[in-house]
Image (cartoon, rainbow, N blue to C red):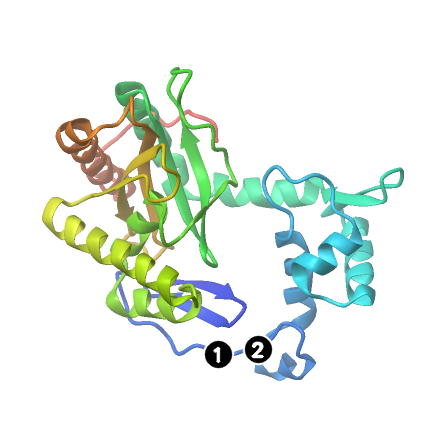
Amino acid sequence: MLGAIYRHAGGRIRFGGNGGQLRKRTKFDPNDDTLNGEGFSTSLVRGLQILRAFGSGDPPLGNLDLMERTGLPKATVSRLTYTLSALGYLVYDEALRRYSLGTASVSLGYTALSSNPVVHVSRPLMHALARETGAAVALAGLEQNEMVYLSNCRSESLVTLRLNLGSRLPLWNSGMGLAFLVGLTDDERDELKRNFLPKNRVERAEMIKLLDDALAQYARLGYITAFGTWQRHIRAVGIPFRPRDGSPPVAFTCGGIAEIIDSKSARQKIGPALMDLREKLESLLEGRNNIAIGDEI
């Protein structure tokens, strides 16, 4: 079965089903109109750039904001925002002269989540783990050089992490990103390194060390821990998950502050619980077990 393709500004990364090999990247520039014959729709790429410019928690954006975030010319941005508004993917506020994501965009995202079996089937398991640990349990997938939350379950604790669907975490130094990276093949990781590691030598060396440490820990324990690697006060335990049907790889984390997650609880409770979650999820997805999955996304 064919694997998933992740696109980025320098080409495309293919994650093969069941850990297959990467396909060769095709270089492209979204602003280069000569690439229409290579299988890319430049207009579509530019339209998606506009939609992707809106981040979680952003205020409405004007055309100037979108120009700065996408690097597209003023005339192109104006034409695309007009078209996307007419189709319902953007909503234009005439008083503010700014745009927000429209219901068509929300509907598209919800459809993707609700039709994703990993997101749907894992919800009860994530809820149970959140209640058991008092921490936040999250599921995320790769989007360029960031991990994007696809699902998040929080405990009743007042000090749990308050990240939501669509929240973005860095790939190279967050617990979620490291958990994702350790589950890839060497070729897949090398492709991401070539395209997304920081150019600064010091930062690059720091990120590579974090990854090497995570790989060694995962080989030894079956999970990774990230204590203060992204935010000093945030601790996370994570595992990768690669569906056997060739769907995109993802990662799960159980995270919180130091008062909730310490080395002992990570080793004795959370790490083994995440591994158990993965085993149960694999069983459910392959039809080897039954579970009530009435939770809403």
**1 and 2 marks in contact (CB < 8 Å):** yes
Residue 17 % position (x, y): 31, 62
Three-letter residue code for mark 2: Gly
Residue highlighted by disc 2: 39
Q: Residue at x 38, y 40 (%)?
A: 139
Q: Residue at x 31, y 63 (%)?
A: 205
| Image-based side of 63 in relation to 158, left or right | right
Q: Residue at x 23, y 40 (%)?
A: 278
Residue 209 % position (x, y): 25, 58
Q: Is 163 or 227 nearer to us in this picture? A: 227
Residue highlighted by disc 1: 26
| Image-based side of 11 in relation to 257, left or right | right
CA gap, disc 1 and disc 2: 10 Å
Residue lying farthest right?
95
**Residue 238 location, quadrant:** top left
Residue 101 % position (x, y): 70, 43
**Residue 123 location, quadrant:** top left
Q: Is 211 or 102 nearer to us in this picture? A: 211
Secondary element type, mark 1: loop
**First in sequence: mark 1 or mark 2?**
1
| Image-based side of 30 in relation to 297, left or right | right
Q: Is 226 or 219 nearer to us in this picture? A: 226
Residue 51 % position (x, y): 66, 53
**Residue 183 in view of the camera:** no
Q: Residue at x 19, y 39 (%)?
A: 279
Secondary element type, mark 2: loop
In this rendering, is residue 78 above or below 155?
Answer: below
Three-letter residue code for mark 1: Thr
